[in-house]
Image (spheres, rainbow, N blue to C red):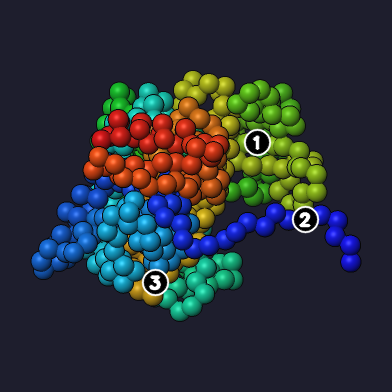
Amino acid sequence: MKRIGSVRRLKVSADGEGVVSHAGLGMLRELAGYTGLVEALDDALADTYRGVPVHAPGRVLTDVAVAVADGADAITGIAVLGDRQDVFGPVASMSTAWRVLDRVDADHLGAVRAARAVAREKAWAAGAGPDLDGELCIDFDATITIAHSEKENAAATWKRTFGFHPLLAFLDRPEIAGGEALAGLLRAGNAGSNTAADHVTVLTMALQALPANARPRPGKTDGPRVLARSDSAGATHTFAAACRKAGVGFSFGFPVDFRIKDIVDAIPESAWYPAIETDGIREGAWVAEATDNIDLGRWPAGSRLILRKERPHPGAQLSFTDVDGMRITAFLTDTPPGVIPGQIAGLELRHRQHARVEDRIRQAKATGLRNLPCRAFNENQAWLEVVLMATDLIAWTKLIAFADNPALARCEIQAFRYRVLHVAARITRAARQVHLRIDKTWRWATEIATGWSRIRTALG
């Protein structure tokens, strides 16, 4: 056989010294400390210890969150930090991490959530916060998490799978890839999609997760504007009433049935207006308001029904609610006229952007949510909180360190790991200091070093 090429053969040995990979994890670990997350979690779980713990519970939980951000899908993933103690210092073992998760029972879960809120307030004050003069959009959605073995409260799901059905709330942050994870409620797999009580619970938790100056003030017009967005699973009278009581606006998907189909048939063509995108007209789509064509008396005062018709994309399967080949969707909102630019087209664009929550959930599943690794339900509840911590640490890192660099701020989690978290570096020691030297040939080396410095300047 004739060789048509050659492969450069490198000499390989296992004797390298002072070299580390995954060096970027130190950025997340420092951020957890600077924001007060470690200390707040220590306070939340202090009464679960009889004496002084060898490894502080706040540091253990945040180390698990950092490992999850790095791609770990089980508690054993904390070893990615333990193997690099020259960079990260002492790290708890897998068994210690498991015991800390087990300490987060129903009596301490609220305190862990409050600790996350403390960290969010400090992160926002350091530059990670949104513009409070605008509208804060909280997106609600549920997802299925498959269980591959018997676990407490795992059950058959409506998708004919087996596992859990958590309900999540993300703060929409379009300036980065991935929103902030405000709240999550772990539920059995057979939990309903439109369970109003669960939506109300998650709404309450999401508002408590916001800093005090970002929460709505019911009955006052000078407070921050907050909007709850969901698909039709959230369109219940109870959830709408809870939003109104909390001073939160709503934009809910509305079920399309024969009643809506008849309304569409009755709307004259002159009443349909072109739908819009952020940069112009949306081709082949039109919107119309149908508030006067339907009885909304059971919904909060000021509720409005908006319809959209659009040509289905090629290959889409038509349904019985399609009218003259047009796909019909509807949503309900209590936003009054004149608040959102673009009138009803602007309202429809804002509601359509709820679809970004699918990306948030997809990235959360790539950050620990795909697998709930524990047998006990309270341990999996704690794991869910760890996943939300990891999501927030990544979001805050992007917002503080890389806001002016779209290649790092707007990349998804897999790319962020490759570009930032998994970067290689060399450890040197001089003048009683440890120096982490990021590989200068790495494309984003300067940006990573600059971002690390920004975090320390803003919070350190």
Element carrying mark 2: loop
Instruction: Tell me the amino acid under the disc marked 2.
Output: Ser
- Find residue 374 and name its label: 3
Q: CA distance from mark 2 to mark 1?
A: 60 Å
Q: Is residue 105 visible?
A: no
223 w.r.t. 417: above or below: above
Q: Residue at x 52, y 55 (%)?
A: 366
- Closer to the observer: label 2 or label 1? 2
Element carrying mark 3: loop
Task: Evaluate if marks 2 and 1 touch, with contact meaning CB atoms under 8 Å apart.
Answer: no
In the rendered image, residue 104, in percent from the top left (x then y), is placed at 26, 64
- Find residue 6 and name its label: 2
Task: Evaluate if marks 3 and 2 touch, with contact meaning CB atoms under 8 Å apart.
Answer: no
Q: Earlier in the sequence, mark 3 or mark 2?
A: 2
- Closer to the observer: label 3 or label 2? 2
In the rendered image, residue 235, in percent from the top left (x then y), is placed at 49, 48
Tell me the crowding category of disc 1: few under 14, some 14 to 19, or many 20 or more residues within 10 angstroms, Cα based: many
Quadrant holding the C terminus: top left
Q: Nearer the viewer, residue 429 or 77?
A: 429
Among all residues in the image, which is located at the extreme bottom? 150
Q: Residue at x 47, y 47 (%)?
A: 424
Tell me the crowding category of disc 3: few under 14, some 14 to 19, or many 20 or more residues within 10 angstroms, Cα based: many
User: In which image quadrant can residue 45 be found?
Assistant: bottom left
Instruction: Tell me the amino acid under the disc marked 3.
Output: Cys
User: In which image quadrant can residue 10 be found?
Assistant: bottom right
Instruction: Tell me the amino acid under the disc marked 1.
Output: Arg
Q: Residue at x 46, y 23 (%)?
A: 339
- Closer to the observer: label 3 or label 1? 3
